[in-house]
Amino acid sequence: MKTFLKYLRSGLILTAIMLVICGLAYPAAMTGLGQAIFPNQANGSMITASGEKTEDPEKAVGSAIVGQDFSGDQRYFQGRVSSVNYNTYTREQAENGEYGGVSSGNFNYGASNEELKKRVEEDMQEFLETHPGVKMGDIPADLLTASGSGLDPNITPKSAQIQIPAISAASGLSEEELEKIVKENTSGKVLGVFGHERVNVLKCNLAIAEKIGEI
Amino acid sequence: MLQIILTLLIFIIVVIPMGKYMYHIATKKRTFADPVFNRIDNGIYKICRIDRSGMTWKSYAGHLLMTNAVMIFVGYLILRIQSVLFLNPNGIEGMPADLSFNTIISFMTNTNLQHYSGESGLTYLSQMVVITFMMFTSAASGYAACMAFSRGIAGKKKGLGNFYEDMIRITTRILVPFSIIFGLVLIWQGVPQTFGANFTVETITGKLQDFATGPVASLEIIKHLGTNGGGFFGANSTTPFENPTIITDMVELISMMILPGACVLTFGKMCKDRKQESLAPGEENRIRVKEPIFGGQGKTVFIAMSVIFIIGLSVCYISELKGNPILESVGLSQDMGSMEGKEVRFGIDQSALFTTTTTSFTTGTVNNMHDTLTPLGGMIPLLHMMLNCVFGGKGVGLMNMIMYVILAVFLCGLMVGRTPEYLGKKIEGREMKLVAICLIVHPLLILGFSALAVVTQAGLEGITNSGFHGLSQVLYEFSSSAANNGSGFEGLADNSMFWNVTTGLAMFFGRYIAIIAQLAIAGSLLAKRRVKASIGTMRTDTVGFAVIVVVVVYIFAALTFFPALALGPIAEHLTVWF
């Protein structure tokens, strides 16, 4: 019994000190440092309609590193399929409970799942109808597959390219203008090796919105 | 392909100095940072009045268990009453009892299996003083056990060291400083770190968008460094706020590899120590042996682990690259590979690398959704958790691998009819019984609970994919629990009484039975007299022996898990492709 109490006492002390160091002091210090050195990133990398950094949600139109839903508007680039609809919703959807609160994730369909096949077939059908001239085998895989997080901010340059004619027709911007926008918002591989070429959908669409006078 | 090779090269380059640093910390040799840390540590010892004398294996294990028990109790309490505590800007409710039980076992055992979703299940305070706190302490506990174990088998001194000293030294000298430095790198790249509430913006199309935020970066870095793996958000390191760029991806990748890798190097150096000591006094100074990078014994283990890792990585990468033939058949080109559940910024190569690493090093963090992997691509993470020794979690992976090493020594000994020896100690009945316990508990937990899940209604209700993939979901969940990994085939509807309790038990026994048995082996070997190496002694520091270990691991896995794998991923592969 005496040894038990001795063990217990040491255990309690260690727990207390680790709790203070690792659970309180360390995250607090990190928050202080992060807010002081990188205030924009530490608060979610928010950007305004003109693409400038901001820390105020009132002025922001999104986050530079998180994807956004533009479905239903043919004038804009479309991102990847999202199981959580990028946490984007209309006021009605919030009121009638269609929007279930902020989350992240994927449909989690296994490769052999019938639902996966069905979803891709339906999306394919819709894409071919809204993008005349596109052939079935030409659609890049990332455009019709769901991202892991449901918040992927990027599509591949090929996926941007294939959308350009349809966006040009709907927005009135020339294909050259749109190509230029895509190019400006494409980031390459780090050091030429690591990662993949990717297009930031939100930034492209902000550029489009500016040109067509939406903002 | 090239970036996979380069990333692994970076790992090899950084693990060498890290191994050296860790070895110096474990053996209390001098390091450059001593003047600062000695003061901090001595302060802590003084405040806590910690007894710093050496411990026997029983007392070491006792202190470890007691400390973990206290932490479990405190953490459980906080989760239950989190709604009324401070730092709850998003108005989160308290956590139900069965889910709290699962969560707290999960984080204390370094598993980080999550049946809740971070965005809606935890307050910022819980994310800090339960999750972040346990990420440090569970990693430190694993490391402490491993160092005690290494001292035991490589051992020269009496006793396995002091548990509290090990805990504090690893925390103040490695975990906290590295977390601060690389945590700042994560923030720089875009991982949020704030106490402010979730926010909503109005988009240019007039819709609203919600963002979940919080003290993410401070959790994110220790999640990898401590091979923990539990994400701040539901989708873990796939979410842009946890893993925004390829740079953060690589920081996270290397941080989860570095300490388990360094443990192997430390072990090798400790074994070498003993050899030097056996030289005559005085002689040691004359032939001042250079500190080895790996140490012969460490090298064998490192090679064996690397071979299994590379084989797994190749299978996973190729399988993902081939894509999903069913999607090809409906007209979606699979030239890019299987992109379902993956992020564009990581692509196939970095996703396959992350997947293999997170399950080999039993971290459990994911940068793509494992449920959506191709059948064979998903079999690799499953298999590596079943093996549980390919580098493995912080500290415990090395101990598991040594179990296979002892088994290999034993089998070879039987073949030539000699009493097997490892590191100059005879391996006898008692050690082999303990090794057998370690090796059998793991498959027993996985297969036993899986069998239970597929014969009960409560278990079956969790399965969300039909057919063979459904069995894979069940196997994956229990492999992940027993191996203390924590990743999941996330489609599984696992927040129910059945799943919370069964996986909780699997995690608990998977962790503590192994640790106790392994410390007992260390204690038992330490007490034995060393036998002189003779011409008949099998050498365990050769490449040949590394090959034997790899074969033993694969044969053991095949005998134990092949039937289950054949019914799950292999059967699914055959139905998808043919």
Image (cartoon, coloured by chain):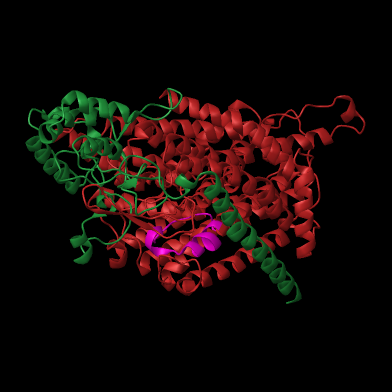
Chain colours: A green, B red
Nearer to me, B468 or B228:
B228
- Residue B155 place in picture, x, y as percent: 76, 44
As displayed, is residue B409 above or below residue B108?
Answer: above
Nearer to me, A211 or B442:
A211
Q: How many marks?
A: 0
Asked where in the image residue A102 lies, by quadrant, the reply is bottom left
The verdict on residue B487 being magenta is: no
Residue B149 visible in the shown view: no
Q: Residue furthest right?
A: B282
What's the residue at 38%, 31% (across, down)? B349
Horizontal side of A194 relative to A109 (left or right) equals right
- Residue B340 place in picture, x, y as percent: 27, 40
- Residue B191 place in picture, x, y as percent: 46, 46
Q: Quadrant of the N terminus of chain B?
A: top left
Horizontal side of B201 relative to B30 (left or right) equals left
- Residue A215 place in picture, x, y as percent: 24, 43
Residue B537 visible in the shown view: yes
What's the residue at 72%, 67% (across, down)? A10
Asked where in the image residue B366 lies, by quadrant, the reply is top left
Horizontal side of B577 relative to A48 (left or right) equals left
Horizontal side of A55 relative to A211 (left or right) equals right
Nearer to me, A109 or A150:
A150
What's the residue at 14%, 46% (across, down)? A72
Q: Which residues are magenta?
A: B109-132
The verdict on residue B118 being magenta is: yes
Q: Quadrant of the C terminus of chain B?
A: top left
